[in-house]
Image (tube, rainbow, N blue to C red):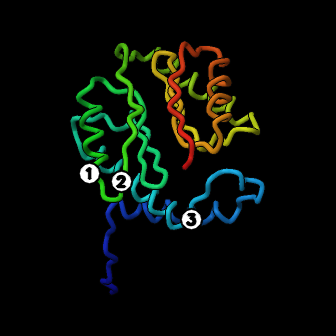
Amino acid sequence: MNTHTTPSKSPVAVAAMLCMAALLMTGCNQSSTESNTPTTTVGTQVDDAVITSSVKAALLGDPSIKSLDFQVETRKGTVQLSGFVDDQKQIDQAMMLASGVPGVANVENGLTVKSAPATLGSGIDDTTVTTRVKAALLEDPGIKSLDISVVTSHGEVQLTGFVGKKAQILAAENIARAVPGVSGIKNELMLKK
């Protein structure tokens, strides 16, 4: 009988390994036409993926934060938090937790306090709006929509992430604004450095 067991890995370590594998695979498929945006090394991308996973783990570990409502993006050590939260205390706590993660150089606050509690109907409507905005962004060949996170609360759409050109920031906002059901836009997109 074989009694050999493998050591268990922490969720953060597993997430970091998965992110690293995904980054290595996508790096092989990049075309040479994308050279007009600032580049990062595979090592930096892996570091950013580990930071993102660590920030998400820190947020999930804090019971005072509803971290499933958060989006976390990292580029060269700059962490961007976005999403809709219940109150300012959650924003302050999230900022403090993210700042304390090793490797974080800067934390950008894109969090917004919800205007009213969500109902089942508004949650379904917001999910539909989010899906429509993501689909509209995917249809535009000038926008790298996979670099853009979309979150909706009561019809207000929040766009976050890092894009290569200033024109993409405005174009993404205009595309989202034209989607039926969008009542407002909070554009938190940032340029890649």
Q: CA distance from mark 2 to mark 3?
A: 17 Å
Q: Position of residue 40 (x, y in %)?
A: 57, 60
Q: In the rendered structure, which amino acid carries the disc numbered 2?
A: Val
Residue sitting at x 64%, y 63% = 27
Which residue extends farthest bottom? 1
Task: Say which quarter of the image contains residue 102.
Answer: bottom left
Would residue 167 appear left or right of 32 to someone viewing this image? Answer: left
Q: Callout 2 environment at 10 Å: few (<14), some (14 to 19), or many (20+)? A: many
Q: In the rendered structure, which amino acid carries the disc numbered 3?
A: Thr
Residue 138 has which mark? none
Q: Secondary structure at mark 3?
A: loop
In this rendering, the answer to whether 40 lies above or below 61 is: below
Look at mark 1 in the image and give the residue it sits on. Answer: 100
Q: Position of residue 156 (x, y in %)?
A: 50, 18
Look at mark 2 in the image and give the residue it sits on. Answer: 104
In this rendering, the answer to whether 77 lies above or below 112 is: below
Would residue 177 appear left or right of 18 to someone viewing this image? Answer: right
Q: CA distance from mark 2 to mark 1?
A: 7 Å
Residue 41 has which mark? 3
Q: Secondary structure at mark 2?
A: loop
Residue sitting at x 51%, y 35% = 160
Q: Callout 1 environment at 10 Å: few (<14), some (14 to 19), or many (20+)? A: few
Q: Secondary structure at mark 1?
A: loop
Q: CA distance from mark 3 to mark 1?
A: 24 Å
Q: Mark 3 or 1 closer to N-term?
A: 3
Q: Is there CB contact under 8 Å for labels 2 and 1? A: yes
Q: Position of residue 12 (x, y in %)?
A: 35, 59
Residue sitting at x 53%, y 15% = 184
